[in-house]
Image: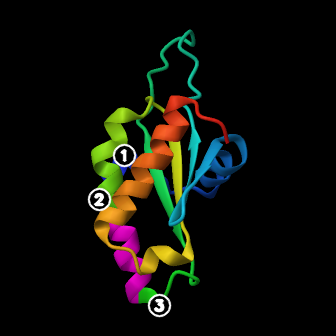
Amino acid sequence: MLPTENRLRRREDFATAVRRGRRAGRPLLVVHLRSGATDPHAPGESASPTCAGFVVSKAVGGAVVRNRVKRRLRHLMRDRLSELPPGSLVVVRALPGAGDADHAQLARDLDAALQRLLGGGAR
């Protein structure tokens, strides 16, 4: 489970990450990353924590399948938050194949997408 301070909850934050962030697609998911936007020279400003949110549509499966995919993705992201720059916004969108994938396959695709985004690979 993700700690409360690391959860992306507001619609505006989701929109910012998706519209202004970089994107990396994999067969099971798409990851949008908006790097930390805090101004280090602003007085009294401290780096906000990295926040992650998840989008799992009905195309993935029924309610049970969607919730299972969200739980798996939250668990996987919890271990990877420390690799991301402080103040980053991450949105993980599950694609229809994610409902049939096991934990290891989701982890592999998530790692590959994050590596591509953090390594500066081409879109």
Q: Which corner quadrant holds the C terminus?
A: top right
Q: Quadrant of residue 47?
A: top left
Residue 105 at x, y percent in the picture: 36, 64
| Label pair 1/2, CB-CB below 8 angstroms | no
Kindly give the residue lying farthest to the bottom in the view shown.
62
Q: What is the number of the mark on residue 85?
A: none
Name the residue type under label 2. Answer: His
- Residue highlighted by disc 1: 5
Give the farthest residue toward the right: 19
Badge 2 is on which residue?
75
Residue appearing at x 48%, y 56% in the figure: 53
Q: Does residue 40 lie above or below 98 as drawn?
A: above
Mark 3 sits on what residue? Answer: 62
Q: Is residue 35 above or below residue 108?
A: above
Q: Residue 65: within the magenta?
A: yes
Q: Secondary structure at mark 3?
A: loop
Q: Looking at the image, do the residues carrying marks 2 and 3 touch, with CB atoms under 8 Å apart?
A: no
Task: Tell me how far mark 1 sits from mark 2, CA to CA.
Answer: 15 Å
The quarter of the picture where the N terminus appears is bottom left
Dot 3: few (<14), some (14–19), or many (≥20) neighbours within 10 Å? few
